[in-house]
């Protein structure tokens, strides 16, 4: 019988990875809902945008969360949509990820719990990296019309199954 002993660090990393995967699933679900709301609200938000988010102990935590949500929601509503699924996903996920960063910064001001501080710092790092990746993708894929791309409400055709996977 073989016994595997994981270090505390390895167990924490595995737990963080599981949380990240769960957060990604939630983010994808929220993006789909936000895209639906975006199309119902019209092509862009009206009115002036909210002030930029600023994490400060001058406000209670709940007010910081409200501010972060308002900025994120406004950014997602103002995201330039063109009907190309990949483009629309990325342009909406950038402000969504920035919202997660802003919320994590707010938490860092108000918590001393080491597990929550570690989670918030991980969110900041990962979401910043993902924003950079999405910005680079947008640079490599200039805005194009949906002609020749997958229609907005139809799934892409499945990719061929990789070798060895059935």
Image (spheres, rainbow, N blue to C red):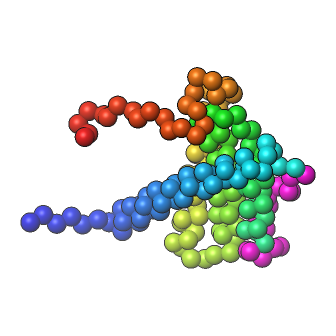
Residue 154 % position (x, y): 54, 38
Residue 108 % position (x, y): 65, 68
Position of 9 with respect to 104 (left or right) is left
Position of 58 with respect to 13 (left or right) is right
Residue drawn at 74 percent across, 56 percent down? 73
Q: For residue 61: magenta? A: yes
Q: Report the front residue among 74 and 118.
A: 74
Quadrant housing the C terminus: top left
Q: Quarter-wise, where is residue 136 in the image?
A: top right
Vertical relation: 163 (above or below) 67:
above
Residue 70 % position (x, y): 78, 60
Q: Report the front residue among 83 and 67.
A: 83
Residue 48 % position (x, y): 90, 52
Which residues are the magenta region? 47-62
Residue drawn at 66 percent across, 50 percent down? 36
Position of 32 with respect to 72 (left or right) is left
Q: Quarter-wise, where is residue 162 in the image?
A: top left
Residue 96 appears in the picture as rendered? no
Q: Report the front residue among 9 and 136.
A: 136
Vertical relation: 113 (above or below) 46:
below
Residue drawn at 70 percent across, 71 percent down? 109
Residue drawn at 55 percent across, 52 percent down? 28
Vertical relation: 155 (above or below) 139:
below
Name the magenta segment's main secondary structure. Answer: loop
Q: Quarter-wise, where is residue 66 in the image?
A: bottom right
């Amino acid at each position: 019988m073989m016994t595997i002993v994981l270090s505390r660090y390895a167990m924490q990393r595995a737990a963080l990875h599981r949380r990240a995967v769960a957060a990604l699933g939630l983010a994808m679900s929220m993006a789909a809902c936000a895209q639906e709301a975006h199309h119902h609200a019209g092509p862009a938000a009206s009115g002036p945008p909210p002030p930029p988010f600023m994490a400060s102990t001058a406000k209670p935590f709940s007010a910081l969360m409200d501010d972060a949500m308002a900025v994120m929601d406004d950014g997602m509503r103002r995201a330039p949509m063109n009907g190309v699924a990949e483009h629309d996903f990325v342009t909406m996920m950038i402000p969504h990820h920035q919202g997660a960063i802003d919320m994590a910064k707010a938490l860092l001001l108000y918590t001393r719990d080491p597990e929550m501080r570690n989670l918030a710092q991980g969110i900041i790092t990962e979401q910043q990296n993902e924003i950079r990746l999405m910005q680079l993708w947008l640079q490599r894929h200039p805005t194009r019309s949906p002609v020749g791309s997958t229609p907005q409400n139809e799934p892409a055709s499945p990719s061929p199954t990789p070798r060895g996977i059935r």
